[in-house]
Every structure is written in structure tokens, then in C-alpha cells.
Amino acid sequence: MNPLLIDAYGRRIRKLRISVTDQCNLRCRYCMPLQATFMDKDRYLIPAQYGEIAAELQTYGLEEIRLTGGEPLLRAEFAEILAALKPLGFKKLGLTTNGILLDRYLDCLEVNGVTALNISLDTLNPQTFQTLAYGRDLTKILNNIALARQRRFQIKLNTVIMRAINDGELFDLVEYARDLDLEIRFLEVMRIGYACQNQSQWFISAAELIQRLESRYRLTPLESPQDATAFSYRLNGGPVVGFIASESQPFCGHCSRWRLGADGTLRACLLKEDGVNLKNIPPARRWELYQTLLGLKPYLRPPEVPHAMHQIGG
Ligand code: SAM
Ligand code: SF4
């Protein structure tokens, strides 16, 4: 049996986020600019390479995988990537998506063992969606959430909440999620990449949101796993609302996640641009690189970072 990936602070790596593309069909203002630049597609790993790296990390204790991007469903070989991961039988295989193309992939996701879907939904208002994400597909996203809801996925909605942009929809979003019997999680806007320019004016802490919710609901805290990034509450004994408070309550001290970029760069943290590129490294040399990476994982939350979220894989 191989050793586990455990760093000097006792943090064990058991989750991997895999970015399969840095491209996107939206332009959320906190994530990428209108005129974004993308890596050449010939730098992408091929589907079998994602499978090979995931299989190797599994022998060192990796348990969960989530596919992300950019928008992962834009990757032409998305189905092949899933097919390469499915036989590995991870405890959890998840996807984070903006939902625009979800209807086309529901069968593929089900067949390939994806159980956990995180769908980003920042607003219920088409005008706000246009302003915030340069998107015209809100109806499509809402329809796709309803379609996914009819299947057996465990679905969570992810909302980046921003002052004077969508915070006025806090209760509407909670009620929308409650009506569909879905968990909704509010993300603090992070000081990363393009968000840095406006983060201080947009930022609302989870504590403030909780206070607002308490004006209308009774909140009961729920238990979460030690390495969870979110904490959650049950509202009035019914819907569950979570918070990812990466700015006001960072969780770096118990983070169990590494990130694999679309080009094969393995990173210890979303907020660290440096990593190790595995693309042309033979498996025999990788253990050494994994040790280097364990040492690169920050214990304290790095401050504002310049690199773009969609390039690392959010
Ligand atoms: N395109 C997919 C989506 O939007 O769900 C997956 C990639 S996206 C980068 C992953 C998540 O990161 C989304 O929920 C998005 O809202 C979140 N995100 C992007 N930039 C962020 C920022 N500056 N602060 C907080 N969350 C951010
Ligand atoms: Fe695209 Fe997701 Fe970034 Fe929005 S958050 S621009 S949907 S990658």
C-alpha cells in the first residue's frame, strides 16, 4: 500500500478539482474579462491522461473528484474524460457548471457515475444576469436546473453574492431553492484575478447574510465534515443554506484539496499560481513532485492574488 499524501500540518489530500478547459460561454465579472485570453487547446491533457493521473493519485488516498473549468461542458472531449474517470470508482465524482449546456449532458453524467452537481446561479433576474455575466441564457439555465432536478443527482446551487448587484435577491434565491428542494450556498466574492478591482465594494460577509436571514427564519447550524469548505444551516426546519466564507472565515488550515489544470499543472491551492506540470513527467518521478507540492500548500490564507480563477479552475 502506498503512503498517503499528508503535509507537515497533518492535512491529508483526498480531493481533486480537475479543470478540463479555461474557456467559458459566460463572462461573470468576478471571474473573467469580456476579452479573455485562453490557452491553446493543444496544451490540454488528453482524456486518458486525466484518468492516468487520477488513478495514480487514488493509490495515494485520493477519494473525490470534481470537474470544473472555465465551463467544463464546453470541452469537446468532456464525455471521454468522464469515461476515463468512471472505471476508477471514486467515492464521489462531481461537476461544477454554469448550467447552460446541462440538458445535453444529463444522460452522459448519469451513465458515467457523476452524482454531485453544483450549478452556479447568481440571479433570477434576466437583466442582472446580462449585467453580471453578459449572459442571455437565464431561462435555459433555470429550465436545466428543473431538468436535472428530475434525475437522481445531489444538486447544490452556488451563488456569489455581491452588494448592490444581487444581494437584494437573497430571500428570492432562498425561496427558489426551497421550492425546488435544493440546497443553496452563498459564496463570498474572493480577491482573485478580475474580482480584485471591485471586490471591496461587492463584498458581503457570510455573517451579514446570516444576520439578514435571521430576520425571517430560524437558523439551526448543521454538522459538516472537518475538511468542508462550506458550513450550513437549516432554515425553519426545512431548506438548507450553506456559506463558503473563504474571505472572512478561511478554511486553509483543514483544506484537503489539490487542483489539476487543463494543461496538466497540479497546484496545491486555488490561490497559488505555481505548481508542477505533470504532462511529460514519467510516473516514476511524480512522487517526488507530489512531495514538493505538499510543501507548497499554504496554511494561512494568501491575500489578494492576481491570476484569473478560470485559468486555474474554480
Ligand atoms: N463555469 C463553472 C461555473 O461557473 O460553475 C465552473 C467554474 S467557476 C470558476 C466555479 C465557481 O467559482 C463558480 O461557482 C463561480 O461562481 C465561482 N467564482 C468564480 N470567481 C469567483 C470569485 N472571484 N469569488 C468567488 N467565487 C468565484
Ligand atoms: Fe464562466 Fe464559471 Fe467564470 Fe462565470 S464563474 S465566467 S460561468 S467560468
Image (spheres, helix red, strand yellow):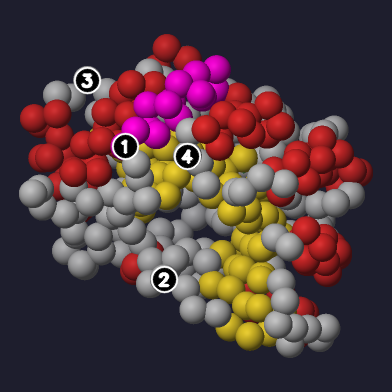
> Do the numbered discs 3 and 1 sit on residues whose CB atoms are within 8 Å?
no
Residue 207 drawn above or below residue 109: below
Sequence-earlier tag: 3 or 2: 2
Give coordinates of residue 12: x percent, y percent: 25, 60
Instruction: Tell me which label, 3 or 1, sits earlier in the chain.
Output: 1
Q: Which residue is mark 3?
A: 280
Q: Mark 2 falls on what kind of element?
A: loop
- The amino acid at mark 3 is Asn
Q: Earlier in the sequence, mark 1 or mark 4?
A: 1
The quadrant where residue 236 appears: bottom right
Element carrying mark 3: loop
Distance, label 4 to label 2, CA atoms, is 23 Å
Q: Is residue 79 magenta?
A: yes
- The residue drawn where x is 62% and y is 40% is 97
Q: Residue furthest top?
A: 42
**Amino acid found under the numbered disc labelled 4:** Gly
Q: How many marks?
A: 4
Assess mark 3: CB under 8 A from ligand 1? no
Residue at 18 percent across and 24 percent down: it is: 281
Q: Nearer the viewer, residue 60 or 196?
A: 60
- Residue at mark 1 to residue at mark 4: CA–CA distance: 10 Å
Q: What residue is shown with label 4?
A: 113
Q: Position of residue 250 (x, y in %)?
A: 46, 68
Residue 205 sits above or below residue 40 on the image: below
Q: CA distance from mark 3 to mark 2?
A: 36 Å
At x 85% / y 33%, what residue is drawn? 136
